[in-house]
Image (cartoon, grey):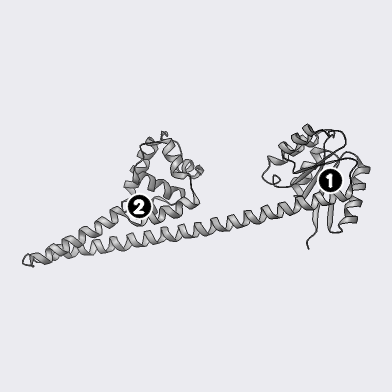
Amino acid sequence: MQPKTILIIDDNRDMIRLIADELRTYNHNFNILNANNGLNGVRIAREEVPDLILMDWDMPIMNGLEAIRVLKNDDKTQEIPVIMSTGQMTSPENLQLALEVGAVDYIRKPVDFIELSARINTAMRLKEQRDAIRDLLQREIDLKNRKLSTTTMLIVEKNGLLSEFYNKVSRLEGVLPDLAPDELKKQVKQLKKNIANHLEIDSSWETFKVHFDEVNPDFFTRLKDISKDLSHKDLKICAYLKLRMDNKEIARLLNITPGSIRTALYRLKRKLGMSEEANLRELIEQLD
């Protein structure tokens, strides 16, 4: 088993030494770091990212509560469980304050080391469970993203094939002899119309939207909160922008020219109340 790293932050060197020795007695697999105030503790936590922090409350330069606030506002350290330890701030109100700031547990001094070891092991198990759940959710998101990418690719390929068929039928229609049977002309015209309808309606959109909503559940709602005037085509363009597609890729999906996309993006910015200089793609990518 990989050693677990515990950072002890306390301004009493004798207390640090005592806790470190006792923790090693109860668990030889602990790697112990230490700091003599909250400011140094935050610095070490950022550098080493320990598995758990045992934090004294009353310290010079930066006390325990201030240190926890800093740690919880840093992406690198916000998930580290912190157990607050104190011999003075022992009231129920103090306990509530420590937990509200971000501590996961609270232990009173003088420390009972059997209790401390049990609380540390519990905090670490809870962190491992949270990490496992987060990993599972991330794998699920990755799977949905792969489905979304596959669906998008299929739409692009389908539209490409339909465009090719449409062009071939158009050329065939152009070379039909004037004396060709009316029924043949009628069938060619109907075939061309059917292909055009599929290109315009894009029945694959609903399949795409199902997968897109799984990954970005509130995206369309937030868009509509910004503007009630967005058309079905506008929503499609915004979804494709969210996937970081360029103008040519979006044009292929919508079966229009890149020039038409530029015009559509300009109109979309106006509907969203954006200035000409504003970055539409940046706005769309920030919507969750």
Instruction: Reply above or below: 146 against 119.
Output: below
Q: Quadrant of residue 253?
A: bottom left
Q: Secondary structure at mark 1?
A: strand
Residue 66 in sight in this render: no
Please tell me which of labels 2 and 1 falls first in the chain: 1
Instruction: Reply above or below: 261 against 61.
Output: below
Q: Amino acid at mark 1?
A: Ile
Residue 56 in sight in this render: yes
| Picture disc at residue 61 | none
| Picture disc at residue 8 | 1
Q: Residue at the location (82% across, 51% down)?
A: 118
Q: Position of residue 174 (x, y in %)?
A: 15, 62
Reading the image, the residue beneath label 2 is 251
Q: Residue at the location (46% across, 57% down)?
A: 148
Q: CA distance from mark 2 to mark 1?
A: 58 Å
Within-10-Å neighbours for mark 1: few <14, some 14–19, many 20+: many
Instruction: Reply above or below: 250 against 164.
Output: above
Q: Position of residue 264 (x, y in %)?
A: 34, 43
Within-10-Å neighbours for mark 2: few <14, some 14–19, many 20+: some
Residue in front for this viewpoint, 129 or 219 = 129
Q: Residue at the location (92% across, 42% down)?
A: 13
Q: Amino acid at mark 2?
A: Ala
